[in-house]
Image: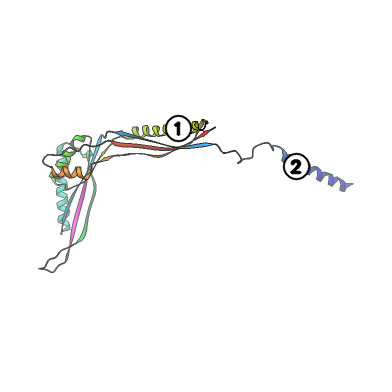
Amino acid sequence: MRKKQIIYTAVLLVIVVLLLSGCGSDQSTPGTAEAPRVIQTYGEAEIKAEPDLARISLAIQTRGTDAGAVAEDNARLANAVWDALLGYGLNEDDLKTGAYSIYSYQEWIDDRLTGEKSQMSYQAVNEIIIKTTELESVGEIIDLAVRAGANNVNHVNFELADPQELLMEALAMAAKQASLKAEAIAGSTGDSITGLYSIREERTDYIPFTASDSMMKEEAEMAAAPTPINPDQVTVRATVVAEYTFK
């Protein structure tokens, strides 16, 4: 009799387990939800704007066979350029030393008297970066610096003093374009957009206008009568990648 009770109890437990395992069988199992239907689009925008800031990179280069004399000569010319720019009306905040270097190099010569085939030479380079909002004066500033001792114009960039507002505007335009593209794609198949699934910024930047080498060469050749350097517009760009659900 006790053996029968054990069997009945075991059977009952099996039935209970089976019943419990069947509960909620109509509920969705985690991870088996149907993936959303999405349309991925790429939005981009470009805004042209007038620059309101110029950055001029000039350099004073001096060379010689005596390192001390090269450095001293460079410092003298750099101070002369600095003083000339301050005298023009620029202030200390408008000027800064971008880089300074002095290095040695072997220079090949053919001195038949001494029999020397090479000599140690030195070069010092002192970069001065000038910023100004007076864009029409860029040519005059370069001319002044060259007269004072600057002998190399590295580059002239025309930029935006504060590009943030235009960058945000371009970003919003790019997002709007991505949305319009998604709507167009969905509409072409008889579907409709139901919402934004994801969006990410790909790129947001702007490209300053850099004066060409030919423009700067013309400026240097006409130091007596500076040629105005007329900048083109700068380009503000933004791109996004977005995904939209549809049905």
State whether the magenta stretch is mostly helix, strand or loop. strand
Rendered location of residue 139, percent (x, y)? 17, 39
The disc, 2 or 1, on the residue closer to the chain's N-terminal end is: 2
| Mark 2 lies on residue | 18
Three-letter amino acid code at the position of disc 2: Leu
124 inside magenta stretch: yes
182 shown above or below 74? above
Residue 179 is marked as: 1
Q: Is residue 206 left or right of residue 106?
A: right
Q: How many neighbours does mark 1 have within 10 angstroms: few (below 14), some (14-19), or many (20 or more)?
A: many
- Identify which residue is drawn at 19% across, 35% down: 136
Rendered location of residue 53, percent (x, y)? 25, 36
The front one of 122 and 49 is 49
| Quarter of image, res 66 | bottom left
Three-letter amino acid code at the position of disc 1: Ser
Outermost right residue: 1
Rendered location of residue 229, percent (x, y)? 19, 38
The front one of 157 and 94 is 157
As measured in the structure, the alpha-carbon distance from the residue carrying label 2 to the one carrying label 1 is 51 Å
- Identify which residue is drawn at 78% across, 44% down: 14
95 inside magenta stretch: no
- Identify which residue is drawn at 21% across, 39% down: 92
Q: How many neighbours does mark 2 have within 10 angstroms: few (below 14), some (14-19), or many (20 or more)?
A: few
Q: Secondary structure at mark 1?
A: helix
Magenta region: 119-127
Q: Secondary structure at mark 2?
A: helix
Rendered location of residue 242, percent (x, y)? 46, 37
